[in-house]
Image (tube, rainbow, N blue to C red):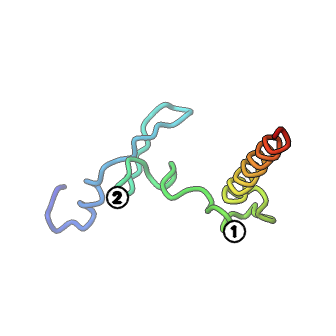
Amino acid sequence: MKHASNPMQKAHAAPRCTATSKRSGLPCKNPAVKGWSVCRMHGVGGGHGSGKANPAYKHGMRTREAQEMRKAVTEHVRISRQLERMIDDI
């Protein structure tokens, strides 16, 4: 029943999710989210935020920014120790 006045025609014509079922191996029949190739159940918009938006966030010591800061500080300490050794050798 393809009729121009049917409001569900647009929904039925939407592109489908490309994910497949683990159990049956059949493709998912849900419509894909606009701009994505999968539906909302198969990964669009999923996951937690980063930093304080993540529910597992406790103190910030293991955030990406903190780890990068520790690497930078360690590199500066290493360079300063090398300079100290060079000065002591003179």
- Image coordinates for residue 9, horizontal then vertical, percent: 23, 60
Front residue of 51 and 61: 61
Front residue of 78 and 53: 78
Looking at the image, which residue is at 51% across and 52% down?
41
Q: Are marks 1 and 2 in contact (CB under 8 Å)?
A: no
- Image coordinates for residue 46, horizontal then vertical, percent: 55, 56
Q: Quadrant for the C terminus, please.
A: top right
| Displayed quadrant of residue 35 | bottom left
Looking at the image, which residue is at 78% across and 41% down?
86
Horizontal relation, residue 68 to residue 83: left or right: left
- Image coordinates for residue 30, horizontal then vertical, percent: 41, 50
Q: Which mark is residue 52?
A: 1
Q: Secondary structure at mark 2?
A: loop
Horizontal relation, residue 24 to residue 49: left or right: left
Q: Which mark is residue 64?
A: none
- Image coordinates for residue 51, horizontal then vertical, percent: 67, 64
In this view, 60 is above or below 29: below
Looking at the image, which residue is at 38% across and 52% down?
36
What count of labels does the image hold?
A: 2
Q: Which residue is mark 2?
A: 34
User: Label 1, label 2: how many angstroms apart (C-alpha)?
Assistant: 29 Å
Front residue of 9 and 72: 72
| Three-letter amino acid code at the position of disc 2 | Lys
Q: Secondary structure at mark 1?
A: helix
Q: Which numbered disc, 1 or 2, marks the residue that appears first in the sequence?
A: 2
Looking at the image, which residue is at 50% across and 48% down?
42
| Displayed quadrant of residue 47 | bottom right
| Three-letter amino acid code at the position of disc 1 | Lys
Residue furthest left as drawn: 4
Label 2: how many Cα within 10 Å (few below 14, some 14–19, many 20+): few
